[in-house]
Every structure is written in C-alpha cells, then in structure tokens.
Amino acid sequence: MKRTLTFIVAITIATSVWAQHATTFVFVKITESIMPLQRGEKYEDPLDEALKKAGLGEVTGAGSMLTKEKTVEWIGLDVELTDPVTGIPFLRKKLTELGAPAGSVLEYERNGETLQVPVRD
C-alpha cells in the first residue's frame, strides 16, 4: 500500500510539472517582404520581449519564404505560448501594433484541429 501511494504521488507531481511546461506552438505568417535583419528588429525582438514580459511565451525561430527569383515573399515566426487562451489575442494585438499587414495569420492546433486566425480583423 505504501509503495502504491508513493507511486501515485510521484505520478501526480510529475504530471503537474509537465503541465506547467506544456506550450502551444504558433506559426506566425507575416505577409511582408523584409530582409532577416529588419525582420528581427521589427518583429522578432520586440515580440519576444513582450511575450516574456507578459509571461506568455517566447519567439523560438524565424525564417523567410523566397520566390523563384530569390526575393522575400513573406516571413514567418515560430512562437511557443504558455497560455494560448490569453496568448493568441495578445499576439494579434502586438503584431498589429508592430505593423503586420493585412493577410498575416496565426496558425496553431487546438484539440487536434489546425486553426488559422488572421492577425487583423
């Protein structure tokens, strides 16, 4: 009985710790043709700072989609949110403030379903 109780307590603690670190991946597609250094200055760095300050997550990566002519077609940011219920509206507001143009979207999964939400209404 004592071993079973110890095992149950250990599993409960481990599950609680894991749940605290679970995040939601959000891909941010920004329909703007800017170079990597400008992307960092305009979006990555300020968004990362704002997410961390709010305790909602962080920017974990970024990239650019190139055309056949090797020009930037659009840019993408990888974001890990600790709380998507609060984080998705926060991302939309902050990206709008940073100047993300119409056509920019957030892509993420909820309950096994892929969702795409516009940054701007």
Image: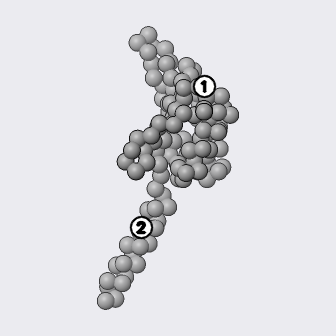
Residue that mark 1 sits on: 101
Query: Measured from the top left, where is residue 115 in percent x and y?
Result: 45, 40
- Residue farthest to the front, as pictured: 121
Residue at image x 44%, y 72%?
13
User: In whole angstroms, how far apart are the C-alphas of marks 2 and 1?
Assistant: 40 Å
For residue 50, what is the image quadrant?
top right
Secondary element at tag 2? helix
**Mark 1 neighbour class, 10 Å CA radius: few under 14, some 14 to 19, many 20 or more:** some
Q: Is residue 10 above or below residue 37?
A: below
Viewport quadrant of the N terminus = bottom left
Q: Nearer the viewer, residue 104 or 64?
A: 104
Q: Position of residue 14 (x, y in %)?
A: 41, 69
Which tag, 2 or 1, sits closer to the chain's start?
2
Apparent side of residue 78 relative to residue 11 in the rendered image (left or right): right
Residue at the image position 46 percent from the left and 67 percent from the top: 16
Q: How many marks?
A: 2
* Label number found at residue 111: none
Residue ranking furthest to the bottom: 1
Estimate the x, y position of residue 4 in percent, counting from the top left.
32, 83
Q: Is residue 101 visible?
A: yes
Q: Secondary structure at mark 1?
A: loop
At horizontal 61% and vertical 53% (from top left) the residue drawn is 55
Amino acid type of the residue tagged 1 in the rendering: Pro
Please give the name of the residue rendered at 40% of the width and 41% of the height, measured from the top-left corner.
114
Which is in the foreground here, disc 2 or disc 1? 1
